[in-house]
Amino acid sequence: MLAILIGFIIGVGMPMQTSINSRLRSSVGSPFLSSFASFGVGTIFLAVITLIESHTLGVSLSLFTSQPAWIWLGGLFGVIYLTSNILLFPKLGSVQTGIMPVLGQILAGLIIDNFGLFDSPRRALTVTRGIGALLVLAGVIITVAAKGWLERRHNRILEDAETEAATKQSGLWFWRVLGVIAGMFGATQTAVNGHLGSVLGSTAHAAFVSFFVGTLGLIILVLLLRPELKLSAPAGKRNPWWMWIGGVIGALYVLGNVYLVPIVGTGLAVVIVLVGLMTGSLLIDQFGWFASKKNPITGIQLVGLLVMIGGVALIRLF
C-alpha cells in the first residue's frame, strides 16, 4: 500500500513540476534560464543523496572508453524534455502538456522494447501491446480534440468564427506534436539512465550524473543564447518561494521510481504513476494551482483519460 501511495504521489508531482517551472519562467523571462535553475537545484539535491549513499560523486575514467558514448546523454535528453514542457504549458494547459509527452513516451517505449535499444531487454510488440498503443492514441484524440469539436458543433453561429477556431486548433497541433517528440526524448532518457545505473551500480548516482550533464548542457546553451538575466515579479505580484523547488520534485520522481519498480514491477509502476500524473493535471487545470490558468475539465476529457489509462495498462501489464 505504501508503494502504491508513493507512486501516485510522484505521478501527481510531475505536472506540478511543470506548473512550477512555468511560473519560474514568467519571473526569469526565459525557458532556458528556468530549466537551468530547475536542473541546478535538482543536481544539488541529488548530489547530497548520492554522497550519503555512495560517498562519492565521481566516476571511473575507464567508463569513458569501455562504455558507449550515449550513456552520458541522458541529461541532455532530459533538458529537451523539461524545456519543451515549459514551452508547452502556456500553450496547451496542464492536461494536454501531460498527455502529449505520455503518448511520445509510450511510442518510444514500444520501439525501444521491440528492438532492445540502449541495451534494454527486448520485448516484442505483440497484438495486445499494439491494441494498447491504439487505445492510448484514441484516448489522446478524445481528450484533445473531442471537446473543441463538440463545442464548435453545439455553438455553430458564424462561419467566420468557425474558421478562426479551426485555425487556432491547427496552430495548437504544432505544440502537440512537439509534446509527443519531447515525450520520446523522455522515454529515451529513462532507458539510457537505466543502463547507466547498472554500470555505476547506483540509480541515485546515475540520476546525479544525468542531472549534472543536463546542467552543463544548459550552461553552454545559456552562454550561447545569452538570454537577459532578470528576476521580475509579473503583474506586480510577489515571487512565491515554491517556484524554486521544481528541480527537487523532478529528482524525487526519479528516486521514487527507483523505490517503486522493484516492489510492484515496471508495468504496475507506470500505471500507478500515470494515474497520479493525470490526477495532478486535472487538479491543476480545474483549480488553477501554482498560478496556472483555470481550464475546467469536461466529461468527455475524463472518458479520454480513462481510455488512455486502459491502453497503458495493456501495454505494460501484458
Image (tube, helix red, strand yellow):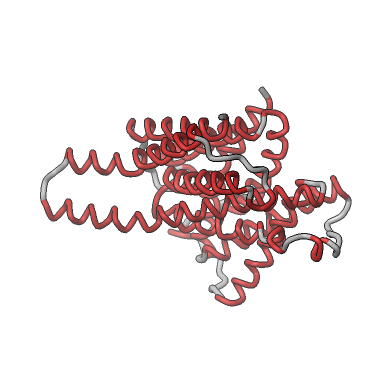
Residue for point 62% across, 33% down: 269
Q: Quadrant of the N terminus?
A: top right
Q: Position of residue 75 (x, y in %)?
A: 66, 58
Q: Quadrant of the C terminus?
A: top right
Q: Residue furthest top?
A: 1
Q: Position of residue 258 (x, y in %)?
A: 71, 39
Residue for point 18% across, 40% down: 153
Residue for point 71% across, 29% down: 263
Q: Position of residue 79 (x, y in %)?
A: 59, 59
| Frontmost residue, 299 versus 186 | 186
| Frontmost residue, 72 versus 286 | 72
Q: Is residue 214 above or below residue 192?
A: below
| Frontmost residue, 141 versus 119 | 119
Q: Position of residue 232 (x, y in %)?
A: 52, 64
Q: Is residue 304 above or below residue 292?
A: above
Residue for point 52% across, 43% down: 106
Left or right for 289, reference 156 = right
Left or right for 259, reference 143 = right
Q: Residue furthest right?
A: 55
| Frontmost residue, 173 versus 229 | 173
Q: Residue furthest left?
A: 158
In this rendering, the count of numbered labels is: 0
Left or right for 144, reference 66 = left
